[in-house]
Amino acid sequence: MAKIKWNWIWGIGITVVFLGLLAHRVEFFREKPPESPEPQTIEIARPPESWMNIYQNRRKIGVIHRTFTALENGRFQTRENVAMQINTMGVVQALNLSTESELYPDMTFSSFHFEINSSLFRFAARGYASHDKLIVFAGLPHAQKKTVLPLKDLPHIGGNIYEAAFRGSLEKGQTRSFSIFDPSTLGLRKVAVTRHADEIIPIMGKRVLTQKFCADFMGAQNCAWLAKDGETLKETGMMGLSMEKVDAQKAREGIAAEGIADFAQIASIASNRILPEPSTLTEIVIRTGGVRNLPLLLSGGRQKFSSGILTITKEEMPDTAPPDKDPPLFGQYLQPSPLVQSDAPEIQKQAAKIISPKDSPPARLRKIVHWVYRTIEKKPVLSVPNALEVLKNRAGDCNEHAVLTAALLRAAGVPAQMETGLVYLNGRFYYHAWNVAYVGRWVTADAVFDQVPADVTHIRLARGEGGEQLDLLGVMGKITLEVLSFKHD
């Protein structure tokens, strides 16, 4: 199965929001940033350099090195390097993140530059914000696409919302909403931060009086303890993740070589019933819990949701559908995006090799899904997936399969989207990603399992390749599933 990639900001995710995965550097940009408002005058004094260890259930899995510099114009520049060992799907991998950011005195960012590197994949995002828009270049370092997002207010970089709350002088018990931006999904979201009672905590052998703040993102909670100068000393999140300030010597101590818990397994949900041969099921009925008031796409198409009961019915695949009969509205699902580069010559060339010009849309869907299933090695990777790198590296988990499938389908003239949610495997429901394509009707498809349509244990929670995926982060650790019934062919 697959981990969730968009959780690098809020999940592991809101759990590793403390990694602060964003940043910037103005001189890297191809366009001149707009003139910015005069910064507020705020006194600040904090260490110019700090180290933090990242723990999973008190076992060290990573380290963070941060620098913080006051600039002459009243702003601040932050630099951050993160090195982690992540276990997902039974494979422990190294993950390195490099970030820079320039911040206003209220901790909103004026610009950022972010890079993530793992064993196979790379991703970079850079951009700058003005009072009414955010301009972002994202994707491969050598082939980034420009996106302009409208802004109602200047956003924060994930981990800086605590310092923003601190400098905003929140009173105890007071809650304030902050905007955050996730460069991997180009998603903007609101996060509620509450100041709790002050606490004395042990840090580096001393007992320190701290201000405690907790951020709530659709029910997912992450808490931070800040010193009197606003420096973050400790954070905790879901799945046993935490981080804590240490000295440079302790930061240099080794990362755990074994015993690191599997994030995919921790996030999965045990099924109350064994489902024999899921691919043969025609219907499944599930009672759900923990999803009330969350912006999830539980109803629509093959899924019906009412009063906590979810019914999923297997679609019928049309035999043929004229390629020129797609509703005009669906044209948007033929367009390229920073991560689904369907207009890239490499993607266009590969799609043309897979299909025949005479193929019907259903035939194109089947051929492309089968080609991705057969060609892409199934292995867990840590990165923000993009179609061009997946095509080049020929490896990845469900996210890589889904992003490449979407790009090839769009290049072949088939409207396609990505869906994310849960899927059943060996007695548990795991977080997973797959596709939905319009071939006369919307049909789900899973290139990891070579299924068209995908089996009914695919529980869609969100659809889209952008900020919609952030909506799942409020579900993790809270959703409950009870299989009530199922039917076979």
Image (tube, helix red, strand yellow):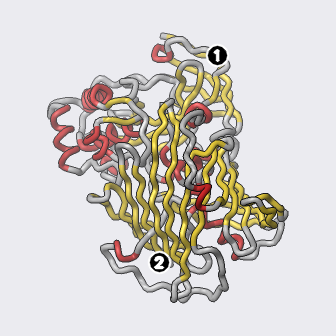
Q: Residue at x 75, y 76 (%)?
A: 169
Report the front residue among 58 and 422.
58
- Residue 405 located left or right of residue 217: left
Q: Name the residue rendered at 69%, 52% in the picture.
A: 236
SS at circle 2: loop
Q: Nearer the viewer, residue 110 or 301?
A: 110
Identified by mark 2, the residue type is: Ser
Which mark identifies residue 35?
Answer: none
The residue identified by callout 2 is 130
**Image point (25%, 31%), residue name:** 364
Disc marking residue 273: 1
User: Tag 1's secondary structure?
Assistant: loop
Q: Position of residue 167 (x, y in %)?
A: 69, 76
Return the x and y of residue 250 as percentages of the image width and height: 62, 55
| Residue 275 drawn above or below residue 54 | above
Label 2: few (<14), some (14–19) or many (≥20) C-alpha neighbours in 10 Å: many
* Residue 223 makes an appearance in the image: yes
Query: Which quarter of the figure has residue 259?
Result: top right
The one nearer the camera, 276 or 259, is 259
- Answer with left or right where residue 386 lies relative to residue 196: left
- Rendered view: 242 above or below 102: above
Is residue 320 shown left or right of residue 127?
Answer: left
* Nearer-N-terminus badge (1/2): 2
**CA distance for labels 1 and 2:** 52 Å
Instruction: Count all numbered tags in the image, as a single digit.
Output: 2
- Which three-letter amino acid code belongs to the residue tagged 1? Arg
Residue sitting at 30 percent across and 47 percent down? 334
How many other residues sit within 10 Å of disc 1, few (<14), some (14-19) or many (≥20)? few
Q: Is residue 333 visible?
A: no
